[in-house]
Image (tube, coloured by chain):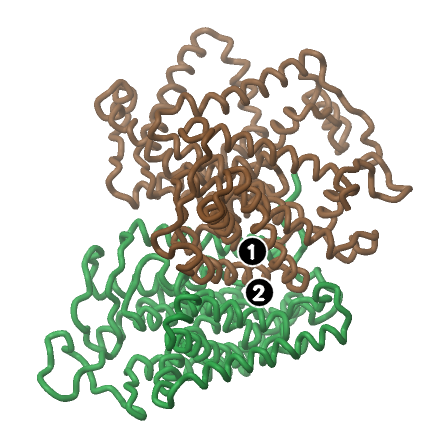
Amino acid sequence: MLRALLSDRAVAPAGTPTASHPGSGQRWWPSRRGIVARVVVIVAIVAAALAVPVGVPPVYEPIVARAVVYAIIALSMNVLIGYVGQISLGHHAFVGLGAFAAGIAMGEAGLPFVAALAVAGGIGALAALVLGGVALRIGGMYLALVTIAFALFVANTLLNITALTGGGAGMSVPRPAFAVDNVPYIYLCLAILVAIWVIDWRLTASKAGRAIRALRDDERVAASWGIDVTRYKLLAFVLSGITAGIAGTLFAAIEEIATAVTYQSLTFGLIIALMVVVGGAGSRPGAVIGGVLFGVLANVLDITQRFWGECQTGWAGGFVQPVGPVPAPGPRALQVAIGAAFVFGGYRLVRAIPRSRAVGKVARGAGAVVSAGAGVVVAAGAITGAACLWAGIDGTAAPFLLALLTLVVLIAYPGGLAQMLAPVLRWLSFRPFRAAPREDAAGSASAAASQGRP
Amino acid sequence: MRATLRRRRGEQDDAPDATEAPRHRRLLGLDPEQEQRLRRIALWGAVGLLAVGLSTLSPINMVRVVVFGLQLGAVYALIALGIALVYKTTRILNFAQGEFGTVAAFVAIAVLLRGDLAGEVEGAPAFVEMLGAALVAIAAAAALGVVVNLLVVERLARASELTALVATVGVMLALVSIQAVVFDIRARRFPRFIQDAPCLGPQTGDAAFGLCPVRIAGTVVTWHTLIVLTVLLTVAAVLAAFFRTRTGIALLATAQEPFAAQLQGVSPRAMATLAWGTAGALGGLGGLLGAGVFQLITPGYITTTWLVAGFTAAVLGGITSMVGAVAGGLLLGVTISLANATVLASDTVASYVPGAPHAATFAVLLLVLLVRPRGLLGKEA
């Protein structure tokens, strides 16, 4: 099985067509300029990600750390939802088990942090193996139910046993000696995130990865291709559990304490599943974006609320006041309504832009100096107004916005944010452009032209 | 990018009734005789544990345990009825079922407080007043169920079952956050329909409306327990009768074969509205009564305290059977009460098995799904 993990050879038998659909042979590879553009953008993104921990004011550093750890948890969950196709609504049980396992390893056994990470991963793998054994027999919705009950059992019974875990006071999970301060710790979490991303990438490219993903669509068909369903399902669960256990250690070490109460909340597990669904199941960048979004939205809303003062008395007020009064952060129902408007408005905007001929026309018309000047002023005013409205929303509206976003994604964009960002992600991954399927000659000609070299 | 979970509902199995229960698969690759043996061991092990638990109780405690268990179980059964109804008609596990209850409870509080959303309900409101608030609340919950169906569930008619499940989770979170925004995140007192009052001695100001509680073998049976049980049995009887009427049969037919039912002149939209409205009303009823058990309500309360056990009760009884939901609920309630009492009887055990109700719920769910997936009274798998 190790060979299956490491090998790159295709598992499909002879006779499978290599093109995704016949007649689409025409491809445009990125030009040299295009490759340079892609590299520049990727380097900029990486640099921004590396600069955030240092550039952010110290009081927000735990928030950044939490965002990174949520991204790791999302990657772990992505294996289950995206690759195997089973939903676990109690994933936070593995996270909690990992946290407490690391606490015990460092506290009672005196192991160093890295060894504790390994122990946490091992415990997470064991718990996931148990759940995987159950999942062999029960699938789909019933498995979701079992995972919730399992998580409640773990958090209320196992993690509450005073002899093991110190009961209500919690267990201390200290940071490693080489990363005691916030900033080095965030870099450690980022490094682990990257490592897990790379492992996930190589896994999906390998024979084992393809076998696991084959389980998602139809297990009987996969079995008929010779894939050992039991083994690969358990493998997927174990990998997910290891990652979740490691994430649990990192999560607890942010505050340097692990309490059972954190994991007794039903919402934690539901949010982990929603992260991946909203971000895009089966997509690594999607899972990371979803994780970060769910982790920090409440805090971001609280931070942007500071801008509201500017909207009243500062420079922004000059733009916005003439149009109308800015709603105060007070009445919460209004905030919720404004937030909902942002979510729906954003959705309509994302759907409208690719199809809008007006965008092209405006882009061309903006060459004129006068209209460009007026356009800039109007755009600045609109953006400032929107920012002032956004500033009126504080962190308590975050759960509602995320729930609304989930529903919008499920109804309109089943592939999540990754589906919305698909053209961008495809561009960044150096893949060639293909001709769109032919509807009529005119359609394909313009499609081919618009998808030409960047 | 691939769609989230692509398997379409209804197309997933060739076997005609495999959609009613989890698929029969090999447990860790054992062959049938070994599996049969494992099943028997699990079943007798559970019976043995039950016997041990029962033996630690004295007869008087037994009555108390059973009475409390029936009270819990009746609320579980009400929630399970709503879940079973939704599953029977749409093949979705409705995770928002608990929130129908919490919303109903908060609407009742709003009515009792006459619009003063930040206040607290003092004392014991008169039975008529509670009844009026309850009717408004149940109507609101039924309307909420219909709205959820129109806005969310119908648009996911062609999606897989897991997508619909995640959508109900999203609805649940949205409802909880709306409650948190409107009603503040704090625990409030929720009054019972009939309070127990002391029979002897002066009435205190608190028991402005109350009746003497009933006693069975020295154990107090609160009026709330009697009310919940009565409501449950009435509702179950009404539902059982309903499914024998023309409309009820039309509902079942729409669930089994929507297209054929449409050809017979049954409107799928009307049936779905009916099903979700009823499920909302049932959830609302469960919420009002559930909040009265511990006389407590807070945003998301019914989901966190009662929903998982409600699901377990539905699975235990057979997820498509209304009678099964009732039986499963009562049985689960008594089991959980028994587990709690057994564990609390000994301090050392209690420190090693905290959270006994959650452990018992998990154990029952696992046992049912592994040993007899169709539940006690579910149809043949």
Q: Do labels 2 and 1 touch, CB within 8 Å? A: yes
Q: Give the residue at x 77% y 27%.
A: A441
Image hue for chain B: green
Residue A398 place in picture, x, y as percent: 38, 42
Kindly identify which chain the residue marked by label 1 belongs to: B
Q: Judge from the rendering whether residue B122 lies leftward or rightward of residue A149; answer left or right.
A: left
Q: Label 2's element?
A: helix
Q: Position of residue A83 (x, y in %)?
A: 66, 46
Q: Which mark is residue B90?
A: 2
Quick check: A203 above or below B90?
above
Picture coordinates of residue A155, whole percent (x, y): 45, 57
- Neighbours of disc 2 within 10 Å: few (<14), some (14-19), many (20+): many
Identity of the residue furthest to the bottom in this view: B217
Residue B244 is labelled as none
Total label count?
2
Chain A's colour is brown
What residue is rendered at 35% in x and 25% in y?
A57
Q: Which residue is mark 1?
A: B164
